[in-house]
Amino acid sequence: MIDIFTSDKLKVLYPKVKSFVEKELYPIEMELLKQPFNDAEKILQQKRELAKKDGLWVPYLQPEQGGSGLSMLEFAQISEMLATTPFGHYCLNCQAPDIGNIELLNKYGSEEQKEQFLRPLINGDIRSCFSMTEPDFAGSNPINMGTTARLDDNQYVINGHKWFTSAADGASFAIVMAITDENAETYQKASMIIVPTDTPGFILKRNIPVMGETGEGYLSHGEILYQDCRVPTSNLIDGAGSGFMLAQERLGPGRIHHCMRWIGICERAFEMMCKRAATRSMGDGTMLGEKQTIQNWIAESRAEIDAARLMVLHTARKMDHEGTKAVRIAISTIKFFTAKVLMKVLDRAIQTHGALGITDDLLLSFWYRHERGARIYDGPDEVHKSALARNILKEYGLK
Ligand SMILES: Cc1cc2nc3c(=O)[nH]c(=O)nc-3n(C[C@H](O)[C@H](O)[C@H](O)COP(=O)(O)OP(=O)(O)OC[C@H]3O[C@@H](n4cnc5c(N)ncnc54)[C@H](O)[C@@H]3O)c2cc1C
């Protein structure tokens, strides 16, 4: 944590979160990862209760909703600590995609939606998912979409095929992006609609295997068929045609959340790399950490993690002061930059451990599998780089 970004609130909360993560989660993290998620969830539930009791629950929400009222800058630093262990965010109910759905419903949900969906989500009684990407259309430019929601007798009838709906397995509802008016202007065609997962026609076809892991429950990515799924029009979020605006609202903070998390993962991987380098004897009277290549990796990783953190905290601070729109390009910048740092640090940490690095005896392989998607989800690297470059080139007169 960096002093210039701290606050009185953080000085109290951060040590508590650190202690919770180190005492309650580090000792059981490997055991939890070896179990199917639905078994691990029973233990995680106890930890969630403990987090609630200790006043750590949903720290990004206001006190009247049970949180600590943290700013984005403050939450960034809590999030980094939580990310040093695989279930840190889950235990404080800060995990994607729920945190994004909570923020969305908080801001744009109707009173009825808040009562029915938001309240139990904040309490941690249910989970949710976000269903936008489709296998047959380029997700990096989602203006084209096959999923439709047709009005019929005060209901929306939803038909479509989605995939990579993370954590759909076991979720109580999905926020679904669907075309509601094919003839509207491009960015007014789509809407977001809440679909309870027990609605007839909501079919979780499969959990998609990712790098050898199918996963289940919270740790999964669902392929979903919506077949004549009928929900009341009151499940529409905000208004018809506001889907893309809501997606932008959801994605801005969501991308900052991911970056904060990745820095926490980097720190833990970095610590593992350094411990290994300092203690692995190479049999020729030298330690691994005496090899210059390893020293280069450690030095470069330290510098890159620190640089990424400063960029992320600066963006978070600016967002607190000037709003999401003001940091649109900064968010693109930290998204691809931090994802790249994450990949490099994880890869170096694995390499430093040799064969052990790719086994499931360490956390590194879990993160390598689960976080390769960082360069793809919420906008692939190439899209963010292009947005940044175009913004820069505009100043040089490029139209
Ligand atoms: C782990 C994971 C979790 C996810 N969770 C969710 C979720 O919960 N809900 C949800 O709706 N979606 C989710 N997604 C989907 C994700 O948002 C999409 O995968 C992403 O938007 C990219 O879309 P696509 O896969 O269709 O790739 P495409 O759009 O087909 O792009 C393929 C590749 O083309 C390149 N490319 C694209 N555009 C450009 C460009 N302008 N210039 C140069 N190159 C370009 C990039 O390299 C890109 O990776 C998740 C994805 C992953 C990997």
Image: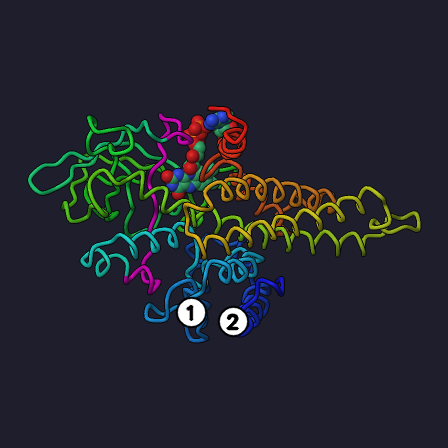
Residue in view at x 69 percent, y 56 percent: 271
Q: Which residues are magenta?
A: 119-141
For the residues bearing labels 1 and 2, Cβ distance under 8 angstroms: yes
Coloration mode: rainbow
- Residue 81 appears left or right of 93: right
Instruction: Residue at 92% x, 47% y: name it.
Output: 284
* Placement of 232 over or under 162, stated as above or below: below
Please state the horizontal and vertical placement of residue 184, each as a whole percent of the image.
21, 29
Q: Position of residue 124 (x, y in %)?
A: 35, 62
Q: Please report the residue visible at 37 percent of the width from the left and 71 percent of the height from the top.
A: 63
Residue placed under numbered mark 2 in the picture: 13
Where's the N terminus, which quadrant? bottom right
Q: Position of residue 387 (x, y in %)?
A: 49, 33
- Tag 2: Cα neighbours inside 10 Å, few (<14), some, or many (≥20)? some
Q: Nearer the viewer, residue 216 or 195?
A: 195
Residue 110 visible from this viewpoint = yes
Residue farthest right in this picture: 285
Amino acid type at circle 2 is: Leu
Q: State how far apart marks 1 and 2 are (Cα).
A: 9 Å
Badge number at residue 68: 1
Quarter for ligand 1?
top left
Decide whether residue 121 is among the magenta residues. yes
